[in-house]
Amino acid sequence: MKTVYKTFTITLFLIISVWGNSVFAQSNHGYAVDMLKGEGNVNGIKLAYQYHAPSLQNLVGDARFYFETSVNMWQYRHGDNSQSNLVLAMSPVLQFPAFSFHNTPFYIEAGIGVSLIDETKFAGKNISTHYQFEDRIGLVADFGHTNVALRVIHYSNAGFKAPNPGLNFLTLSVARRF
């Protein structure tokens, strides 16, 4: 089952991320597919819808802004034990220009949103509440129609209820505009 899950995740990630440029015209709407690697034996996939509000672009210098709504599917495996978790999240995200490398602009990305997590006991942790904050920071390469990002995402309830160990993920994301 572990091999099937991994194969499905990688295949879905690749199919969606390389869907041809000719299918989409540049718009304010987009999608992202993230592969997630969590602490220990946690892996996952995140499917997101992004809205790039035109009126909110360049409010702070050359910063870009978008809203992201996502569904996360996490899988934990330890020995013969297996557990899944479903997460719904919404985050406002800011991207600030950082540098350019071989004519490719790079952005530093940051955002704090909210999430609803199905299981509060997951991967050997008790995270106390179904409602968690979703914090992110990352580096984004902008290839025009496609962005590729490496992010760290942290889920926690900000200390509203103990215990609050949090969950951390490293993600590789491919995003495209419709």
Image: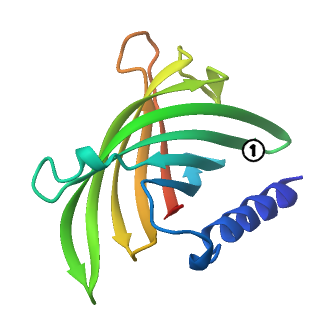
Task: Report the front residue among 6 and 100.
Answer: 100
Type of the residue with mark 1: Arg
Give above or below for 59 relative to 131: below
Task: Report the front residue among 80 and 47.
Answer: 47
Which residue corresponds to mark 1? 77
* Residue occupying the far top of the picture: 161
Tally of numbered discs:
1
Query: In the structure shown, which secondary structural element does the residue marked by tag 1 occupy?
Result: strand
Q: Residue at x 84, y 61 (%)?
A: 3
Q: Residue at x 54, y 61 (%)?
A: 178
Residue 101 at x, y = what percent? 25, 84
* Residue occupying the far left of the picture: 61
Residue 117 falls in image quadrant: top right
* Residue occupying the far bottom of the picture: 102
Residue 161 at x, y = what percent? 43, 9
Give above or below for 45 relative to 15: above
Residue 10 shown left or right of residue 26 in the figure? right
Residue 31 falls in image quadrant: bottom right
Residue 132 shown left or right of residue 23 in the figure? left
Give above or below for 109 relative to 7: above
Question: Quick one: label 1, few (<14), some, or many (20+) residues within 10 Å?
Answer: some
Residue 34 falls in image quadrant: bottom right
Residue 1 shown left or right of residue 6 in the figure? right
Q: Residue at x 69, y 33 (%)?
A: 85
Residue 63 at x, y = what percent? 19, 55
Task: Report the front residue among 48 and 172.
Answer: 48
Task: Report the front residue among 14 and 25.
Answer: 25
Q: How is the image coloured?
A: rainbow
Q: Residue at x 82, y 37 (%)?
A: 81
Residue 119 at x, y = what percent? 67, 22
